[in-house]
Image (cartoon, rainbow, N blue to C red):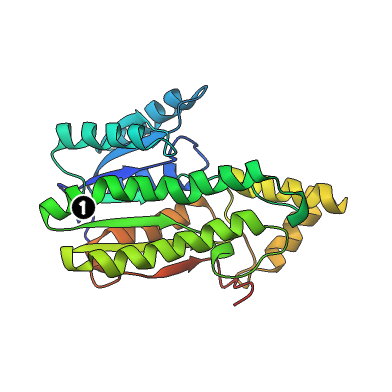
Amino acid sequence: MDQRVLDDKVAIVTGAGNSKGMGWASCLALASLGARVVATDLERDGVQDQLQALCAEIEALGGRARALTLDVTNPKDVDRVIDDVVGIEGQVDILFNNAGLGAGVGPFLEISDQEWQSVWSVNVMGMVSCARAVIPHMQAIGGGVIINNASLAGLGVVEEMSAYSASKFAVIGLTKSLAAEFGKDGIRCNAVCPGSIQTSMYELEIEHVSKSTGRSRQEVEAELDSLVPLGRSAMAREVADVVAFLASPASGYVSGVALPVAGGMAPGL
């Protein structure tokens, strides 16, 4: 792939403030292809410093990046950020809806209404708000790309992940609906469905299984790796490479797809 295929494109990435995360890695991947990156995350202790560090890393590699705080659960805040980006950059070409909450995990009867609402607010309505805010701007410039971070748990059933899994099934439904409705405007929409990826959410999963079974962390990790045909969990950058592909002209005829990035793992399928 031409290393500058995203020159003159503006990409917004949500949930980018964790150096171990897929949002962070995707900012780097998109910038490496020439995109002007806007890295966003929820305002909380240390996140602004993390976002600035990410932007500094991108700029040190010759790219361009800006950092903005964003609460995807607040539609007014979403509009503020999109208006700010369009006002300065003049356009939005790519949205990676990455912000997500790894809650709603555990026995179904023990998941509270508050957990259900929190997961739905971030994982589903956060993506709805961001997509709703950028689509008119993409229509105005004749097209764009939206990539939603779903999960393998949105393609197949995973035990004791009912709230999280339900939210990710919804993300995939949203993805396919946007692809169908806005394809005529030159807007492509796809979802990545990561499996076992070494992020903060992966750490939460390891901790949950370890506590619920009494097994050591090493035993749990070995078991999870054994479920993956490729025999290992992935790094965030391996998902970021797929995000970059879906954002690029190389995937110009790909839309409405929920793409597993899971080393061949396919629970429930």
Task: State the residue at coordinates (44%, 23%).
Answer: 49
> Relative to 15, is 222 above or below?
below
Outermost residue toward the right?
A: 214
Q: Nearer the viewer, residue 4 or 245?
A: 245
> Relative to 45, is 188 above or below?
below
Label 1 secondary element: loop
Task: State the residue at coordinates (47%, 27%).
Answer: 47
The quarter of the displayed image where residue 42 is located: top left
Q: Position of residue 9 (x, y in %)?
A: 19, 48
Dot 1 crowding, Cα within 10 Å, few <14, some 14–19, many 20+? many
Please state, as top left, top right, bottom left or bottom right, where the C terminus lies in the image.
bottom right
Q: Which residue is mark 1?
A: 6
Q: Position of residue 41 (x, y in %)?
A: 43, 34
Q: Is residue 65 left or right of residue 155?
A: left
Q: Is residue 75 left or right of residue 123?
A: left
- Res 97 visible: no
Q: Nearer the viewer, residue 215 or 77?
A: 77
Task: State the residue at coordinates (38%, 70%).
Answer: 257
Task: State the residue at coordinates (52%, 63%).
Answer: 169
- Res 257 visible: yes
Please state, as top left, top right, bottom left or bottom right, where the N terminus lies in the image.
bottom left
Q: Position of residue 135 (x, y in %)?
A: 24, 52
The quarter of the displayed image where residue 182 is located: bottom left
Q: Nearer the viewer, residue 26 or 259?
A: 259
> Relative to 235, is 230 above or below?
below
> Hey, what amino acid is under mark 1?
Leu
The quarter of the displayed image where residue 56 is located: top left
Q: Is residue 29 left or right of residue 195?
A: left
> Relative to 61, is 265 above or below?
below
